[in-house]
Amino acid sequence: MDELFIYNFLMLCLGLSSVFVFIALFFIPAGYGQHVNKKWGPTINNKLGWFLMEIPTVIIYIIYYLIGDRKTDLIPLIFMGMWMVHYCQRTFIFPFLIRGKQPMPITIIFMGITFNGINTYLQARWIYTFSTPYTTNWILTPMFIIGVIIFICGFIINMHSDYIIRKLRKPGETEYKIPYGGMFRYVSCPSYLGEITEWTEWAIMTWSFPGLVFAVWTFANLAPRARSNHLWYVNTFTDYPKKRKALIPFIL
Ligand SMILES: NC(=O)c1ccc[n+]([C@@H]2O[C@H](COP(=O)([O-])OP(=O)(O)OC[C@H]3O[C@@H](n4cnc5c(N)ncnc54)[C@H](OP(=O)(O)O)[C@@H]3O)[C@@H](O)[C@H]2O)c1
């Protein structure tokens, strides 16, 4: 079968599944972290879980870079740099810094690997093979300039918010506390806000359907979780800041 047909089919499936995921997660929060639940089945160590879930993003991207035919083109190299900075951090650093010990359900890991595997294939195959080649002039387009600048802002918000969360616990502690500072002044889940910002800007700077599907999927996955986390904070801590929103400052 023609690879382009399979590629488009996978992109359609991912796009349609985002609608299902968005609705389902409002009723059933993904069973890890504060929402861990025995109904999600057997679990493994969370550091190993994060590593297994994220490693496809690095390996599959490199494979499609190597078998693609634009290895030395400037714009695809910049895209790869941004992708790798985010995903190498998430795969090789983030799991080994987290202080939580909540085990992670194998079901969640399996779903994460499936999404990351398909999505990385869609993004890398697009950039290195199926798109009209990005020429060096792309660097001067508003899509690229705005996309890169706001992507970096999203990355910084994501990293800084993960850092604040991590520092809430001393080594060995496992209880949950109220985070303060940074973008937590405005929202309960700024790391999700940063993540959604990054991949929305990825869609803009690549100006592509696969990028759009990734951005929509990220929102569909993280917006309902931000709501669940926010409600959990409000119901757990009587002194939780009243003006703090769930995901979007002053709005939502
Ligand atoms: N691209 C995507 O679709 C996607 C999906 C999911 C996550 N992510 C990213 O992955 C990163 C982590 O996400 P996550 O959902 O695991 O975030 P999280 O809820 O912030 O949990 C991360 C770690 O912080 C701990 N923690 C959370 N809230 C805490 C609190 N109030 N007090 C003390 N410790 C607390 C957790 O401990 P416990 O283990 O004990 O709960 C866990 O070890 C974020 O940057 C997120 O953007 C991306």
Image (cartoon, grey):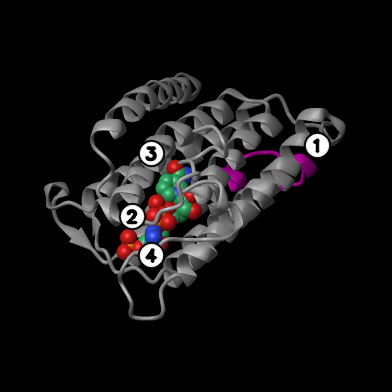
| Region rendered in magenta | 64-77
Q: Nearer the viewer, residue 45 or 69?
A: 45
The answer to whether 186 appears left or right of 6 in the picture is right
- The amino acid sitting under disc 2 is Thr
Among numbered discs 1 and 4, the one appearing first in the sequence: 1
- The amino acid sitting under disc 3 is Arg
The mark closer to the camera, 1 or 4, is 4
- The amino acid sitting under disc 4 is Lys
Q: Secondary structure at mark 1?
A: helix
Judge: label 4 CB < 8 Å from ligand 1: yes
Among numbered discs 2 and 4, the one appearing first in the sequence: 4
Q: Which mark is residue 177?
A: 4
Among numbered discs 3 and 4, the one appearing first in the sequence: 4
Q: Measuring 48% from the left and 71% from the top, which residue is drawn there?
A: 167
Residue occupied by mark 2: 238
Residue occupied by mark 3: 227
In the rendered image, the vertical position of residue 188 relative to residue 16, given as above or below: below
Q: Secondary structure at mark 4?
A: loop
Among numbered discs 2 and 1, the one appearing first in the sequence: 1
Q: Measuring 46% from the left and 51% from the top, which residue is drawn there?
A: 241
Residue occupied by mark 1: 145
Q: Position of residue 125 (x, y in %)?
A: 56, 35
Q: CA distance from mark 2 to mark 4?
A: 12 Å
Specify few, some or many for label 1: CA neighbours under 10 Å numbering under 14, 14-19, or 20 or more: some
Q: Decide: marks 2, 4 in contact (CB < 8 A)? A: no
Q: Quadrant of ligand 1?
A: bottom left
